[in-house]
Image (cartoon, grey):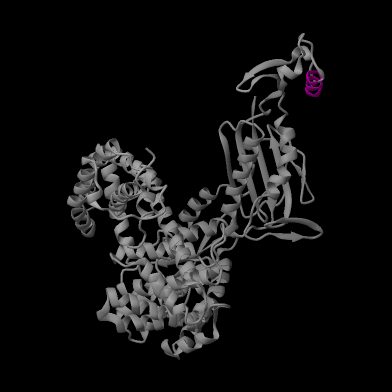
């Protein structure tokens, strides 16, 4: 038989940013638990929740676990029975240990001979019994960014647990967690329906929550919030900001949303739009309101967690709070503008970037030098602007506005630079040097912003690797993975044919003026780290692992050349009938060369067989064409020339003994010939990486 499962963990308000991850982990842990206990999940599990509750629902859950069939092998038959077929102590002991008679023991044929064998079937336990034992640990295992303990309870959880409800097919599953005993009781909305509710089934629970003013599903709350904010903004003649992130945050702050539209003094519209929007969103979780032309209006929409009795009172309360926030922002702006942005650069000497890497001022000096190095190659005519942006781009970090609203770093730098009359290209680059803000995010458009941005990121990466702050597992406090991926994407997007090795070496050379470290070791580590980020990026773009490895394993320096090489190799592998044979041929060459540690020159006068001469002449005839195609990025054409080596190589293997033992000079000459062939093909890819 199958049944339904309902688990609700009632808590104090869970932070909005924790809820979705907590629910995802609850579902994952529950699926693992049921699978490990051999319990069929039928229609599967899903989770939903509000700030005050985590809910797990399962449909079609088996009411008993599957029977366990054990096949136990005992001693060899030759040991278990004597010459007359009578059971020995070994057979008797094995039977007794397994709880069967000797007559019930069977024999099974194995590669090592006949062995005694017992097949036992252990009936499965009731699912309710298993859940009673497993759920306390499951709840305790939910990982949270931060946990807390309360009272005398030594149980860490995201917030104090007030109740636990657990039903399996209408039966209450009894257990205790964090000093709270499970039952069949839940509670509705804290203010609008605070009484206890008895629950008998999943459907009873869902309908009871609706009556108790709790919208249990996050996505439904989001839809409600989008609708009511739209309706509220329309009362003021506008529309709310299109902000899915804010909708999601607010949905995780309320159980039963209602909206009210408020207003603020029009003089605050003199503040930059981004300041107004950020002040409303980050501190108050209010939605900005725009008119039909997209201009900000002196209005906002606030979402409440209750249906208000007197909307005007609630509206005035929100307006009073927002007025104080906007007054603060206006003050910060006026105070910040009393000093030029560049005048703040020296103040960065008082800001410690990282204990071993010095101050933020020292960091600015390092990546300014690195940006100059890049500009010499890709933007020499705007060197002065690059220096100016590098000097200005971190100055807003110590403004009062960014101190209050850290998310405005770069944004306020751009705003202040524009107000001070800097060219648009400079002010835009100050903001764009932070782009992309996240994986897959918008890339910088300006070359100046791109140069300063990747210089800043490379300084972060090499600095952290130098002082031992490499990413470990999921821990990456300096976001080095994101920075490496950003460097790759920016270089590709800008079309800059830069040497990654030289870029890293220059960053290390600048850093070496302040710290002592092993340049060779750090260069190797950083290169490998960036290469792994590139591989993961390409895997995420549906490229095959062996295809990526074949290319990046033989050369990872010119990032701009990698994708075209991978694309054309992929095209060749899927469309050319020669690819399979070429890869097999290269593997034959590679297998021979694995046994050699030295490199040998080729002396044509030592050739004895026609196949040796034919292969050498084919190599000489093709190598210049291959090099020319590779230099031009015509990788498909280069592969076309390489294919012509396949038959001469096969004839070579058929006609000579490469690793001859009788003549060392001949052996080395033949190995040297294969090394030449392999070296030419490795300019394109390591074909031995392909699974053929």
Which residue is at the front of the view, 282 or 557?
Answer: 557
Q: Quadrant of residue 5?
A: top right
Q: Where is residue 179 in the image (x, y as percent from the top left)?
A: 79, 50
* Residue at x 45%, y 83% (from the top left corner): 395
311 sits to left or right of 212: left
| Residue 398, visible in the rendered structure | yes
* Residue at x 44%, y 88% (from the top left corner): 337
Q: How many marks?
A: 0
Answer above or below: position of 59 versus 669: above
659 sits to left or right of 624: right
| Residue 238, visible in the rendered structure | no
213 sits to left or right of 240: right
Q: Position of residue 368 (x, y in %)?
A: 39, 80
- Magenta residues (range): 90-98
* Residue at x 68%, y 15% (from the top left corner): 107
Q: Position of residue 221 (x, y in %)?
A: 53, 51
Answer above or below: position of 335 versus 534: below
Which SS does the magenta portion mostly show?
helix
Q: Quadrant of residue 109?
A: top right
Answer above or below: position of 215 versus 39: below
Q: Position of residue 439 (x, y in %)?
A: 43, 60
The image quadrant where one finds the N terminus is top right
The image quadrant where one finds the C terminus is top left
Answer above or below: position of 210 versus 470: above
Farthest residue, direction top: 84
* Residue at x 56%, y 52% (from the top left corner): 20
Q: Quadrant of residue 92?
A: top right
> Magenta segment: does it hold 21?
no
Which residue is at the front of the view, 146 or 608?
Answer: 608
């Amino acid at each position: 038989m199958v049944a339904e499962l309902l688990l609700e963990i009632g808590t104090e308000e869970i932070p909005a940013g924790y809820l979705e991850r907590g629910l995802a982990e609850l579902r994952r842990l529950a699926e693992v638990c049921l699978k490990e206990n051999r319990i069929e999940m039928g229609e599967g599990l899903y989770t939903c929740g509000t700030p005050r509750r985590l809910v797990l629902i399962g449909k079609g859950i088996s009411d008993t676990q599957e029977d366990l069939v054990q096949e136990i092998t005992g001693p060899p038959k030759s040991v278990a029975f004597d010459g007359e077929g009578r059971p020995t102590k070994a057979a008797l002991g094995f039977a007794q240990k397994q709880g069967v008679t000797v007559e019930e023991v069977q024999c099974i044929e194995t590669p090592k001979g006949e062995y005694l064998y017992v097949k036992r079937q252990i009936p499965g336990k009731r699912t309710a019994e298993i859940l009673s034992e497993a759920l306390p640990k499951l709840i305790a295992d939910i990982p949270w960014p931060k946990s807390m303990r309360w009272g005398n309870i030594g149980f860490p959880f995201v917030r104090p647990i007030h109740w636990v409800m657990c039903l399996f097919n209408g039966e209450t599953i009894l257990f205790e967690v964090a000093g709270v005993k499970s039952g069949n009781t839940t509670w509705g909305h804290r203010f609008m329906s605070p009484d206890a509710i008895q629950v008998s089934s999943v459907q009873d629970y869902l309908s009871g929550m609706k009556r108790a003013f709790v919208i249990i599903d996050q996505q439904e709350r989001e839809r409600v919030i989008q609708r009511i904010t739209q309706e509220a903004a329309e009362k003021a003649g506008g529309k709310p900001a299109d902000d899915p992130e804010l909708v999601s945050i607010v949905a995780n702050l309320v159980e039963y949303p209602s909206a009210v539209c408020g207003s603020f003094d029009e003089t605050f519209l003199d503040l930059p739009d981004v300041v107004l929007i950020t002040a409303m969103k980050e501190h108050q979780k209010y939605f900005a309101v725009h008119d039909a032309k997209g201009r900000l209006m002196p209005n906002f929409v606030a979402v409440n967690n209750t249906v208000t009795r007197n909307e005007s009172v609630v509206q005035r309360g929100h307006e009073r709070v927002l007025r104080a926030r906007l007054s603060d922002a206006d003050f910060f702006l006026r105070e910040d503008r009393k000093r030029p942005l560049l005048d703040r650069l020296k103040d960065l000497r008082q800001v410690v970037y990282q204990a071993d890497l010095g101050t933020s001022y020292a960091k600015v000096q390092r990546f300014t030098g690195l940006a100059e190095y890049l500009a010499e190659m890709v933007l020499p005519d705007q060197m002065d602007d690059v220096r100016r942006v590098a000097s200005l781009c971190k100055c807003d970090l110590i403004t009062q506005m960014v101190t209050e609203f850290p998310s405005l770093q770069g944004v306020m730098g751009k705003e202040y630079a524009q107000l001070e009359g800097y060219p648009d290209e400079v002010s835009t680059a100050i903001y764009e040097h932070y782009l992309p803000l996240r994986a897959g995010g918008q890339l910088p458009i300006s070359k100046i912003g791109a140069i300063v941005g990747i210089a800043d990121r490379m300084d972060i990466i090499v600095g952290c690797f130098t002082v031992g702050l490499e990413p470990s597992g999921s821990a990456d406090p300096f976001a080095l993975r994101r920075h490496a991926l950003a460097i790759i994407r920016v270089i590709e997007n800008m079309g800059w044919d830069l040497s990654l090795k030289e870029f890293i070496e220059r960053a290390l050379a600048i850093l070496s003026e302040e710290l002592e470290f092993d340049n060779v070791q750090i260069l190797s580590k950083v290169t490998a780290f960036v290469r792994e980020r590139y591989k993961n990026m390409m895997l995420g773009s549906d490229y095959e692992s062996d295809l990526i490895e074949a290319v990046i394993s033989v050369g990872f320096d010119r990032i701009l050349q990698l994708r075209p090489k991978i694309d054309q190799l992929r095209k060749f592998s899927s469309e050319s009938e020669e690819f399979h044979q070429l890869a097999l041929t290269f593997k034959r060459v590679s297998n021979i060369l694995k046994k050699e540690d030295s490199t040998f020159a080729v002396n044509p006068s030592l050739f004895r067989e026609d196949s040796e001469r034919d292969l050498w002449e084919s190599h000489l005839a093709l190598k210049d064409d291959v090099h020319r195609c590779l230099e031009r990025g015509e990788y498909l054409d280069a592969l076309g020339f390489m294919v012509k080596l396949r038959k001469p190589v096969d004839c070579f293997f058929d006609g000579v003994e490469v690793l001859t033992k009788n003549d060392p000079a001949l052996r080395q000459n033949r190995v040297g010939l294969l090394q030449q062939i392999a070296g030419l093909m490795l300019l394109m890819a390591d074909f031995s990486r392909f699974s053929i």
